[in-house]
Image (tube, rainbow, N blue to C red):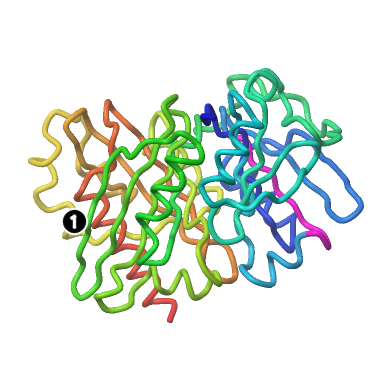
Amino acid sequence: MTVQDLSYAELYTRHAPTAVDYFVSGMGFTRIADSVEPDRSSILLRQGETRLIVTSGPGTTRFLDRHGDGIADIAFSCDDVEATHDAAVAAGARSLGRRHGHPVVSGFGDVAHTLLPHATASAAELPPGRRWVRSAPAPEPAQEGPVRLLDHIAVCLEGHRLTEYADFYEAAFGMSRYSSEYVAVGDQAMDSIVVRSDSGRVTFTLVAPDPSKEPGQLDAFLDRNGGPGVQHLAFLVDEIIPAVRRMSEAGTEFLATPDAYYDGLAERITGMRVEVAELRAVQVLADRDEWGYLLQLFSRSPYERNTLFFELIQRRGSRGFGSANIRALYEAVERDRLAAG
């Protein structure tokens, strides 16, 4: 009854060509295969070990009306699918029947989890269950984009339910609490709990606004998204500076970092062997934890409701998220929210 890996994240969208172009042209993903069903069409994208499925059609309308474009399914590969299904239901999940031959359970909000057998899913080039038609040859290693894998998924929840969902992912999927953080920015504040599978291949950062503080960006997300949902996907890269330059040139927009952030940064990242001027030039944030260093940057949301966005993260030994970076990233999203009105 334990989760081993994250097989794919599935994005529901009203306009698949635009969504696919964002990932392929802007972020370096490759279109791998297509699947057509009576009520929906899906496109499989891959980069490194990351698989995204972009789905549109009548079968997605209910989700899209409620939430706009966003992640609707996060598929887990499990060592024992039926036992995991039963554990999830016992922990409070709703059984949503079977999809493409595999059991599905509720997660948070309207986001579901398809449960796949690990032995099959890990060996399959295409996610099992759908009738995929290959749409492109596999890219040569030299053509691969900068993304290696999905480092973590940030999930925005209501403030009073953070601990409840952390308990749920522990009981339902055998995940463990890895860390927690409380960040106060002016009159606003957020709580977070990180839960991670024992395999280390599935990490959820559960975030929620502090209801005792003034409403801020997380409250705005919950309002625009119609409740809990995936706030962002964090993509792990080997070298973030060239990745940001490459994606920026391709049209991906990233959030700006104030110049004041870089004052005194050299002392905080002593030993990282990177020039602050390089980081400033591409607006990348840098921090360290007890294990090493990490560099991060958020994209601007490309979606109408300004909900789901993306993160690039580079780790040099780091296993955490960096307190200074969490605050800076929170502030960056808040500035963007206020600028957008």
Q: Is residue 186 left or right of residue 144?
A: left
Foreground: 300 or 120? 120
Residue 169 visible in the displayed image: yes
* Res. 313 image quadrant: top left
Q: Residue at x 70, y 21 (%)?
A: 120
User: Which quadrant, please, contains the C terminus?
Assistant: bottom left
Q: Residue at x 24, y 62 (%)?
A: 258
Q: Residue at x 34, y 60 (%)?
A: 256
Residue type highlighted by circle 1: Tyr
Instruction: Magenta stretch: give its range.
Output: 51-59
Q: In the structure shown, which secondary structural element does the residue marked by tag 1 occupy?
A: helix
Magenta span has 56? Answer: yes
Residue 244 visible in the displayed image: no
Residue beneath label 1, please?
261
* Res. 254 image quadrant: bottom left
Q: Position of residue 97 (x, y in %)?
A: 75, 47
